[in-house]
Image (cartoon, coloured by chain):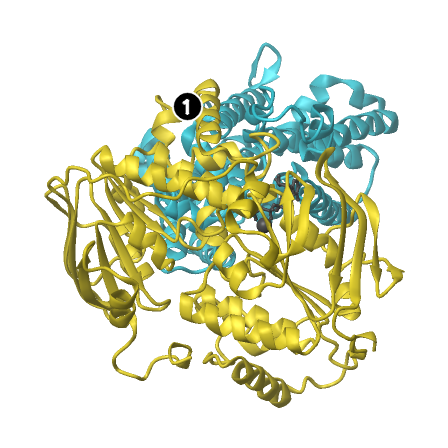
Chain colours: A yellow, B cyan
Amino acid sequence: METATTSSAGETVISARGISKQFAGIEVLRDVDLDFRAGEIHALVGENGAGKSTFAKILSGVHRPTRGTLALRGELVEVPNPLTAQRLGITLIHQEPVSFPDLSVAENLVLGRDQGSVLGRVPWAKITRDARESMDQLGINIKVNVPMRGLSIADQQMVEIARALASDSRLIIMDEPTAPLTPIEVETLFKIVRRLRDEGRTIIFISHRLEEVRALCDRITVFRDGNLVHTGDVAAVDDEEIIRLMIGRSLKEYIHKRRTEIGEVALEVKDLCLPGLFSDISFEVRKGEIVGLAGLVGAGRTDVARAIFGITPAHSGTIAVNGKDIGVAEPTEAIALGLAFVPEDRAAAGIFQSLSVEHNITAAVPGRIAPRGFIRHALERALANEAVQKMRIRLASLRQPIGELSGGNQQKSILARWLLTDPSVLIMDEPTRGIDVGVKSEFYDMIGELAESGRAILLISSELPELLALCDRILVMSEGRLTADLSRAEATQENVMREAVPKSGVHSPTVAA
Amino acid sequence: MSGAEDATTRTPPAADAATPRPRWQVILVRPETVTFLFLIVATIGASWLSPFFADVRYILESFTFYFEFAIVALILTMVIISGEIDLSAASMMALSASLFGVAYQAGLGIPGAMAVSLLSGVLMGAFNGFLVINMKLPSIIVTIGTLTLFRGLAQVIAGDKSIGKFPAWFIGIDYRFVFDVPIPVIVFLIVSLILGIFLGTSAIGRQIYQIGTSPIAARHAGIRVNRIKYGLFIAMGLVSSIAGLLAASRLASVRYDLATGGELQMVLIVMLGGTYIFGGRGTILGTFLAAWLLVVIATGMTVANIPINAQLTVLGLLLIVSIIATNAIHVRTQR
Ligand SMILES: Nc1ncnc2c1ncn2[C@@H]1O[C@H](COP(=O)(O)OP(=O)(O)OP(=O)(O)O)[C@@H](O)[C@H]1O
Ligand SMILES: [Mg+2]
């Protein structure tokens, strides 16, 4: 098999020449020439919609280029589909994990791999053993016989990575692999990636976090509007320069939000319990206040948010919005009370994949687009247009299916949907996941403005710097309990992490890593 | 009768200059267009087989045999778009009609008996809804179960004999005309128009599509998924009982085996109309056209003297072909 050939470090493994891609007449990649070397970690950065994922998909046979050629170690190759890519030793870890939710972790790991003859017995014992082994290799503690459905997004991502490793690829493309991970998990991933590089493999690393690029990558390529604008050593450019290359202007450092008038209690949660997920959760968020909810993945932050919004209501405890006790049992009622919730799992709970961007954006405000029960298209179009402009969503047309937008632009559309509801309490679960630096700073400004206009904001994020910069207070959760309530003065990276780490010591070993 | 997507194709795109797909292409690959073309071809073919067929009146009269199913198929379209299915409709027709017959015989009078029948439809629909929504069972299994259950109950209630002797004003709805058009055709036109407007332009219509596309995302967006699905199942029961009454009027009698096998025709109409079996896509216009297509094909086969069992084979093939075709179109346009 070709994958068995090892290449010496520094040698060019795969080279792309004049790669262009059009979707329905719109060019999203233009004449990209790029060489990847053996034993390098190569960063791919750029704004949302710059064409990073598209380029990755071309390398891995998901899309075919409109023009251009690929050469593997000097020989021209065709990569018509992902299976061929896999045979050539190229694996893509998708931005949105594409696993089979009802199959077990072990089954997902061996998908797409040759399993001998069609009629042959499936060697389940061996598959399970191998799966456990590759999990151990990664140093992660995931049961291999549970269905994927039950895993957190971070764990699903880890399984995807394990799958790439199990297939012994020479070129591994990771499309925003760290987006759903917590800092500790990111460290684990980095260790693995470095080891892969030292084995002489090539890793393409797509990320919006420059500090990660700096910590991990050897070379960097910047895309802008489908053009390759820069390739070079990471050490040779500074962050400011990278940002300027990416967005064509430099970015001011995000300054702490102005102190706003903090008003009455807008959201009050008391003794919220849902056995097995969380217990004794009590806190309040006041008008004009931004409260962060920190913790490790699996700490129960998402479950609390889902309970408040009425998706999986808590068993006991009370929730009050603007002083009124409410028994939220349905998101519809929560929205009517002025709550909004941006879910973490964009692909499943956020977007309507095959529906237009317009219909996606207006999904939560039927009353505004259909004042008398019948949709007024001019109204709807105007609302959607305004949102697209305000959030600078990059799209070809409002009636394009949202699934065709880049990941970051999908996220912006979901944010836009909730801003249209004009919420008084806004709960956001990892809202900046996959959003580029330019938009992120605009988004921070926006959150600041929302707070200033008297809204209460509960922000769940695994990016501590983001929480530290934005929040007036940070709540920390660990193992289903609130472990700290830190004011802005008290909140430091160390303080938050100390409270976030489980005390019982029986949790996942990733924490110890 | 505009489809929901129609609405979005009206104004030019806002952001960038380039449009993804030219409009004519969007229209051409729509399943309803295919249905419409089929309808024309079938009509030409049938008139060639029998000169009778060129007579509009003949087609309209043939329609009265099918329109009960066609009317139920309109609601079934919405149920399927929402991601569910209801196979018990023909049995609901039989049970509600049997109750009507029994109630009439018991001396309730036609209006009272009709009320009983409509109420029973609502209750049967709610029962399906309860099993699917509250018990969280798959609708295909639930409604296969109630298909058998309702038919069995009809036999228990009405026995094996037919119940008739309804007053003259009640019977023969298919032989009454307004401006030469049979009343059933007019009813079908009006109901199609109302439901088409409802599904294509109302907020709830839009939400039905969203639920069918992703029930989880719909719930997160604050759409009352369960309530709307309940509503659809109840509407299904109600329209089935109305169809049962129409059948009773047409046949001048009711029996427990009324509309046996009708679920096949209803699903066939919906599928021929280009509704996506996995939910999220489809239009009333498609179902409307498909109802006529089915009439033309079935009547065409009859005038061409094709034996009944061969006709069934043709219908079965048609069902499979239409599912494959719409599937292909939807998968294509999704990319
Ligand atoms: N299947 C598709 N059909 C039509 N347009 C598409 C399709 N896939 C991507 N595009 C368009 O191509 C452009 C580049 O998208 P791509 O996903 O490569 O961006 P990206 O750089 O990965 O962005 P992000 O950081 O947000 O993930 C976007 O404008 C997107 O709308
Ligand atoms: Mg991307």
Left or right of A504: which side holds A135?
right
Q: Quadrant location of the C terminus of chain A?
A: bottom left
Q: Measuring 58% from the left and 19% from the top, which residue is drawn there? A: B11
Mark 1 near ligand 1 (CB under 8 Å)?
A: no
- Amino acid type of the residue that numbered disc 1 sits on in the rendered structure: Phe
User: Furthest-front residue in view?
Assistant: A236
Looking at this view, is A334 or A72 the one in front?
Answer: A72
Q: How many labels does the image show?
A: 1
Which residue is drawn at the image coordinates 42% and 49% (left, top)? A432
The local secondary structure at tag 1 comes to loop
Q: Relative to B179, is A199 above or below?
A: below
The chain under label 1 reads A
Q: Residue B77's quadrant in the figure?
A: top right
x, y percent for residue A170: 73, 71
| Depth order, front residue of A348/B263 | A348
From this viewpoint, is residue A148 visible?
A: yes
Residue B51 x %, y %: 84, 22
Q: Is residue B53 above or below residue A109?
A: above
The image shows residue B208, relative to residue A492, as above or below, that is above
The residue furthest top is: B179
Q: Quadrant of residue A110?
A: bottom right
Query: Residue at 58% across / 23% down in the picture?
Result: B185
Where residue A455 appears, x then y in whole percent? Answer: 23, 38
Residue with the mark numbered 1: A374
Residue under the image location 18 percent in, 50 percent down: A327
In the picture, which quadrant includes the N terminus of chain A?
A: bottom right
Q: Looking at the picture, how far across and down is residue A160, in whole percent?
A: 58, 68
